[in-house]
Image: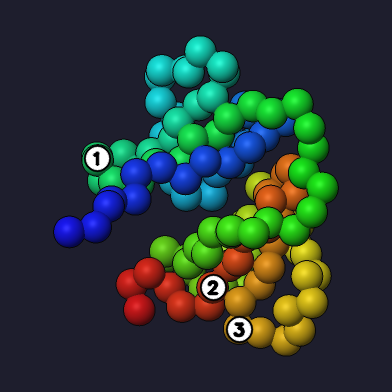
Amino acid sequence: MGSALSTIVIDAHDVDRLVSFWCAVLGWSRSEAVEPDGAVEIADPQAPGSVTILVQPVPEAKTTKNRLHLDIRPRDRDQTAELERLLDLGATRVDIGQGEQTWVVLADPEGNEFCLLRARVDS
């Protein structure tokens, strides 16, 4: 049997800003517990025990393209409507040389790339 994915860790210069952003994007909740180093965990309140995201403080800003990124899918709207919502939350479009694709490459408020896929969760 293999290992289970537990936590995805995102480095952040402004932990509270990224926690707020990702909670709004995913509909997740912030943990009440804060790690001694100031890291904050967020989780899906509808799926206890599932994968979480830990946003941890680092002193440096992001400088290069991510080697790992998140792909997200809209839940209750099409890709165009979800893109508008994400941009309103503070995401920005990013060109990493992807060309014309069915997904949209975005960056969170600290420049971490992620992709918005076309297919909805319920499709």
Colour mode of the rendering: rainbow
Residue 24 lies, in percent from the top left, at: 53, 43
Q: Residue 20 carries which label?
A: none
Residue 48's disc number: 1
| Dot 1 amino acid type | Pro
Give neighbour class at mark 2: few <14, some 14-19, many 20+ (Cα, 10 Å): many
Tell me which label, 3 or 2, sits earlier in the chain.
3
Q: Is residue 90 above or below residue 59?
A: below
The answer for how far apart the CA atoms under marks 3 and 2 are is: 7 Å
Q: Residue at coordinates 47% horizontally, 45% vertically from top-left? A: 8
Q: Position of residue 3 (x, y in %)?
A: 27, 52
Pick the front one: 49 or 67? 67
> In the displayed structure, would residue 27 be above or below residue 96?
above
Q: Which SS class for mark 1?
A: loop
Report the Cα–Cα distance between label 1 and label 3. Answer: 31 Å
Looking at the image, residue 105 lies above or below residue 66: below
Q: Do the residues labelled 2 and 1 touch (CB within 8 Å)?
A: no
Task: Give left or right: position of 46 versus 76.
Answer: left
Q: Is mark 3 on a helix, strand or loop?
A: loop
Report which residue position mark 3 lands on.
102
Q: Which amino acid does label 3 sit on?
A: Thr
Is residue 41 or residue 121 the one in the foreground? 41
Q: Which of 51 and 108 is in front in this view?
A: 51
- In what element is the residue under mark 2? loop
Q: Position of residue 37 (x, y in %)?
A: 56, 17
Q: Name the residue under label 2.
A: 117
- The disc, 2 or 1, on the residue closer to the chain's N-terminal end is 1
| Residue at left offset 54%, top offset 49% | 25
State which quadrant residue 116 falls in.
bottom right
Q: Give the spatial CA distance, label 2 vs label 1.
A: 25 Å
Q: Do the residues labelled 3 and 2 touch (CB within 8 Å)?
A: yes
